[in-house]
């Protein structure tokens, strides 16, 4: 067994390593706190923590509702053990949790070897996801605000106005691990505004998250689940109007949005365009195993990325970002006569306000760091 607990490390490896770790910790303990990582690039302030362990509370403060995933926990522990063994601090830098320095070089070889040794593609994929998440958790600790995922000095939490989402809608942010804890991610706005029970994070490839999501889908039934796919020209997508626009008597297969017992679950793919095909495929494979042969029902916005532009004349952000997709969906739903009384347009406005605040924060950071903002201004800020 291998684990890290409190101020001591217990290993199943050599006694000399154990001794070494204990000595090192004692030295660090003299200051009462232990440096867990150093920083590079803009991260000039070293971050400190009581120990290397990530608790379920710490995990959930970042947004997830799941227990702390076992695979992520294992990798975090392994990284901390490796840090002891090498006597070289874990260094993170660049965008997200990329490991750097001598530790990064060694760990890179080590994790590649682990990956190659895994025989099953599913295990490889889960290892990839868990490692991404583990690195981002350690790299962001003490540096990013746990709610808004912005650097502490840019925290925008006090500007965000919470808003209730109509109780018959639940969003699922199916997020690629490379987008987890990214400052420019916009999917996080949804649970900041609507709360984690109305907009729930599910990290692609993290078993605990995916299980929670699929258990809810199984309970709800296939008719109550829709994946919002960004490409309106993909094989099987339907418009919001086609899906919800007619009554159940006209179209028995359509979803009921006014049946009080039914919640409609919308999956938002929160990743780059290149990653979204793999994410959709995983969802479809899972849907097939749960519901048989039939495909996962997909919908797209009426005019794809340009739908928002028509509806809202003042857009300044990329229309394909995740929050904009949610705004577009809520706006299209609000136009359906049977849903007109649920104030979905106001809920869309709340996300739009959040998006403006995020964009202002990112712009402010860019200016503060001496990077230029061109004539196009905000359009130069990359969000996803
Ligand atoms: Zn914040």
Image (cartoon, rainbow, N blue to C red):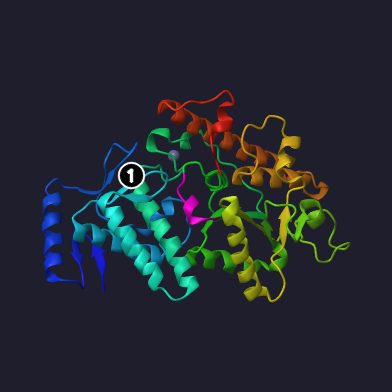
Q: Residue at x 40, y 60 (%)?
A: 131
Which quadrant: the C terminus? Answer: top right
Residue nearest the viewer, comparing 121 with 145: 121
| Residue located beneath label 1 in the image | 142
Residue nearest the viewer, comparing 2 with 264: 2
Q: Residue at x 49, y 50 (%)?
A: 179
Q: Residue 267 vs residue 98: left or right?
A: right
Instruction: Please say if 167 is above or below 77.
Output: above
Q: Quadrant of residue 350?
A: top right
- Specify whether residue 367 is in view: yes
Residue nearest the viewer, comparing 375 with 173: 375
Secondary structure state at the residue bearing disc 1? loop
How many marks can you see? 1
Image quarter for ligand 1: top left
Circle 1 residues within 10 Å: few <14, some 14–19, many ≥20: some
Residue 59 location (% of width, % of height): 40, 55
Q: Residue at x 59, y 26 (%)?
A: 376
- The range drawn in magenta is 175-182
Which quadrant: the N terminus? Answer: bottom left
Magenta residue check for 158: no
Instruction: Please say if 124 is above or below 260.
Output: below
Residue 29 location (% of width, % of height): 14, 51
């Amino acid at each position: 067994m291998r684990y890290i607990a409190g101020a001591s490390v217990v290993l199943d490896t050599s006694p000399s390593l154990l001794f070494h770790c204990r000595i090192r910790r004692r030295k660090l303990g003299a200051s009462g706190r232990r440096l867990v990582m150093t920083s590079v690039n803009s991260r000039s302030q070293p971050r400190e923590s009581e120990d290397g362990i990530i608790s379920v509370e710490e995990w959930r403060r970042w947004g997830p509702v799941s227990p702390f995933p076992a695979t992520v926990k294992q990798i975090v522990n392994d990284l901390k053990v490796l840090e002891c063994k090498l006597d070289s601090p874990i260094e993170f830098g660049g965008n997200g949790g990329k490991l750097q320095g001598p530790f990064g070089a060694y760990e890179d070889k080590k994790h590649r070897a682990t990956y190659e040794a895994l025989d099953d593609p599913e295990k490889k994929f889960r290892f990839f996801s868990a490692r991404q998440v583990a690195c981002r958790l350690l790299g962001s600790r003490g540096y990013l605000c746990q709610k808004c995922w912005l650097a502490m000095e840019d925290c925008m939490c006090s500007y965000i106005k919470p808003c209730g989402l109509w109780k018959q809608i639940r969003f699922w942010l199916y997020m690629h691990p490379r987008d987890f804890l990214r400052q420019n991610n916009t999917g996080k706005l949804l649970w900041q505004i609507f709360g984690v029970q109305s907009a729930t994070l599910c990290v692609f490839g993290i078993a605990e998250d995916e299980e929670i999501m699929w258990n809810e889908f199984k309970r709800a039934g296939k008719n109550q689940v829709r994946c919002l796919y960004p490409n309106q020209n993909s094989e099987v997508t339907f418009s919001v109007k086609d899906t919800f626009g007619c009554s159940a008597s006209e179209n028995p297969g359509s979803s009921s949005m006014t049946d009080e017992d039914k919640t409609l679950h919308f999956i938002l793919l929160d990743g780059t365009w290149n990653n979204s095909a793999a994410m959709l495929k995983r969802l479809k494979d899972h849907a097939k195993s749960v519901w048989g042969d039939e495909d996962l029902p997909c919908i797209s916005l009426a005019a794809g990325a340009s739908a928002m532009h028509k509806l809202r004349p003042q857009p300044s952000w990329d229309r394909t970002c995740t929050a904009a997709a949610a705004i577009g969906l809520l706006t299209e739903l609000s136009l359906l006569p049977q849903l007109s009384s649920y104030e979905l347009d106001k809920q869309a406005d709340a996300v739009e306000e959040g998006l403006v605040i995020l964009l202002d924060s990112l712009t402010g950071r860019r200016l503060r760091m001496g990077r230029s903002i061109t004539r196009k201004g905000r359009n130069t800020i990359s969000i996803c």
